[in-house]
Image (spheres, helix red, strand yellow):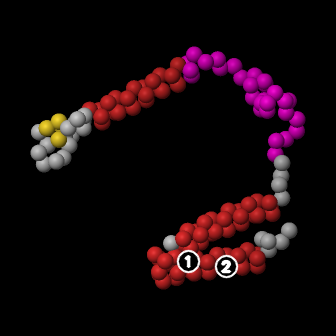
Amino acid sequence: MQNVAGKGIVYASGGFAPWQPEVVSMAVFGLVVLVLLVVLLFMTRWLGEKKITAVKVEPYECGIAATGTARFAYPAPFYLVAIFFLVFDIEGAFIFSWAIAFDRLGWMGWLQITFFIFILLLSLAYIWKKGGLEW
């Protein structure tokens, strides 16, 4: 056995010993953090004030008194446009990645990206047929 500059004990076979100071210190640190977390949460629950008043349950918005409802209904097409943007944005990322690696992917990569674009075109046709692009 030999000690290699703070790397723990190394056996003649080249493997490390099952007990290493780095692992033990990390486990002790994790345990101390967990115990401290549990103690602090228990203390705040035990010592904290438990009165519920109208002021505490009122929503706080930067010091401005709340008036009316916080819900603002956007029309469904706004959500649909957002979802379509995400889908086609991710499509663009995949196609650009494929274009960069085109020479290394060969015909198999070309077939896969063609299949991917075909599925996206089918989904676009489905959305169009269902009226998802109409305002």
Sequence-first disc among 1 and 2: 1
Marker disc for residue 121? 2
Q: Is residue 135 left or right of residue 35?
A: right
Q: Secondary structure at mark 1?
A: helix
Residue highlighted by disc 1:
113
Observer-nearest residue: 86 or 7? 7
Q: Is residue 48 magenta?
A: yes
Q: Is residue 50 left or right of residue 99?
A: right
Q: Is residue 135 magenta?
A: no
Q: Main secondary structure of the magenta part?
A: loop
Q: Residues within 10 Å of mark 2 (few under 14, many from 20)?
A: few
* Residue type marked 1: Ile
Residue depicted at 78% across the width and 71% down the height? 132
Quadrant housing residue 64:
top right
The percent position of residue 98, horizontal first and vertical second, equals 54, 72
Residue depicted at 32% across the width and 30% down the height? 25
How far apart are the alpha carbons under marks 1 and 2? 12 Å
Residue depicted at 14% across the width and 43% down the height? 11
Observer-nearest residue: 91 or 82? 91
Residue depicted at 83% across the width and 52% down the height? 73
* Residue type marked 2: Leu
* Magenta-highlighted residues: 44-71
